[in-house]
Each structure stands twice: as C-alpha cells, then as structure tokens.
Image (cartoon, rainbow, N blue to C red):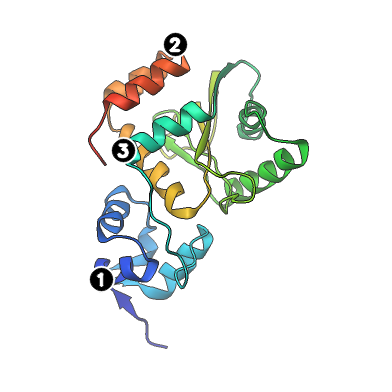
Amino acid sequence: MSRSYLTPSEAARFLHVTEATMQRWLRQGLLNSALLSGRGIERDALLRWAREHGITPEVHTTRLPKPAADLLADAIERGAVQVSSEGHDAVSAIELALQGLEGLDEEQRKTLLRDVLERERMATTALGHGVAMPHPRRPPADIIQEATISLLFLEKPVDWAAQDGEPVFAVFLILSPNATVHLQVLGRIAFMLRNPGFRVMLERFRSQQELVDYLRTIRREP
C-alpha cells in the first residue's frame, strides 16, 4: 500500500495549527522522528501521533489564547510549587505533585493519576537536565479549564530513565485543557531548559513567585 507524505505546510493544515507552530514542533523534536523521512511527514503516522496526543485533525480548531511565555508562567502561578523529601520514584513523585493541587476531589485525583501513569508507561517523560514533565495521555478537559502545572522539587533526585542518565529533581506535572495548549507548554519548557539561567533557577529554587517573575522576564518566543 502506498504511503502519503505531507510537507510541513500541509501537515499544519491537516492538524489545523499554524505553520509556525508546526515548524516549532519540528525544531523542538516533539514530532517523533519515525514520522519523518526524506519524502516528508508520513500522513498516517502523523494521524496516529495526533490522536495519541488528543488532537482530532478532522475537527480540531483550537488556537492558543496568549503567548507561550505567559502561558507557562500563568500555569505555574495557577498550580502549585512544593519541595519534598518523600518522593522515591516516578510514581510517588507524580502522586505528590497531584496532592499539591487544590480544587481537585479524590475521584479526580485518581483519574488523573491513572491517566498520567498510563502515559508514563508508554515512554519516559524525563527531558534531561534533571527535569521530567509527566502528563495525562489525553487532555483532561472535563477536569482542567486552563493550563496548570504542579511543580515538585525532590530533595533526593530519582531515576526517571532519562536519556542523559541524569536523575530527576524537578517534576513539572502538566495538566492542559486541550492538545494545542499542551504542546505549547511542552515546547516552552523544552525551550527554557536550553537557557542556562533557567536551569540554575531550578537548581537554586527559592519561591514560586521568584520563578514566575523570572519566566515573565523571558519574552522571546521559542
């Protein structure tokens, strides 16, 4: 059976996102290399990838309401930041991050934990540099209306199967209302991790407000 290939512009139209967003995803490596070849982006593989990330190409029309820089700062300010000595592996760290969020009932916490662990079983969410970004396999739109991050700093870093072999000390638990916002948040964190100043800020964390204020000073888009 012949395969259909798309240019980045065609792939953007297929997913109903802007071409700039598609190019950014490609630069940041958010699109799995298995989708790409010398002939372009394989359409069926892109469709599977989109559905795995909660994007429905046929009807998806969501647009990002504000710049990604504001989105990340707002998500951390809206969520929670805590330091803990209790997390001893990825599962317990994710549980602690969920416990830090206010406004969730017990059933919602159980649902989110199940979905986040399901995604984690697919592949590690450790990015390297001691940072992991666990998140549900599908956006929990029925629970979360705006992007929210629960940031957990572990006093004793844990093995998260990161490609660079570094244990994780900073856990960004990401909850997004839709796939477009989710990918923007992922991309913004990946972009910030290339900034040595941001990595130092994480390693020397002092307060939630200091971190949010720092993010708001970084205005350049990824």
Give the mark nearer the N terminus: 3 vs 2. 3
Secondary structure under tag 1 reads: loop
In-image side of 205 versus 200 (left or right): right
Please tell me how many numbered marks the rendered image carries. Answer: 3
Figure check: 209 above or below 26: above
Circle 2: residue type: Arg
Secondary structure under tag 3 reads: helix
Give the mark nearer the N terminus: 3 vs 1. 1
Alpha carbon distance from label 3 to label 1: 24 Å
Residue at numbered disc 2? 206
Where residue 120 sits, quadrant-wise, is top right
Residue under the point 47% across and 34% down? 75
- Give the x, y percent position of residue 64: 38, 50
Figure check: 206 above or below 18: above
- Give the x, y percent position of residue 159: 54, 30
Residue at numbered disc 1? 7
In the picture, the disc for residue 191 is: 3
- Give the x, y percent position of residue 219: 25, 32
- Give the x, y percent position of residue 48: 49, 68
In-image side of 142 versus 70 (left or right): right
Circle 3: residue type: Phe
User: How packed is label 1: few (under 14 Cα within 10 Å), some, or many (20 or more)?
Assistant: few
Residue under the point 67% across and 28% down? 99
Figure check: 216 above or below 173: above
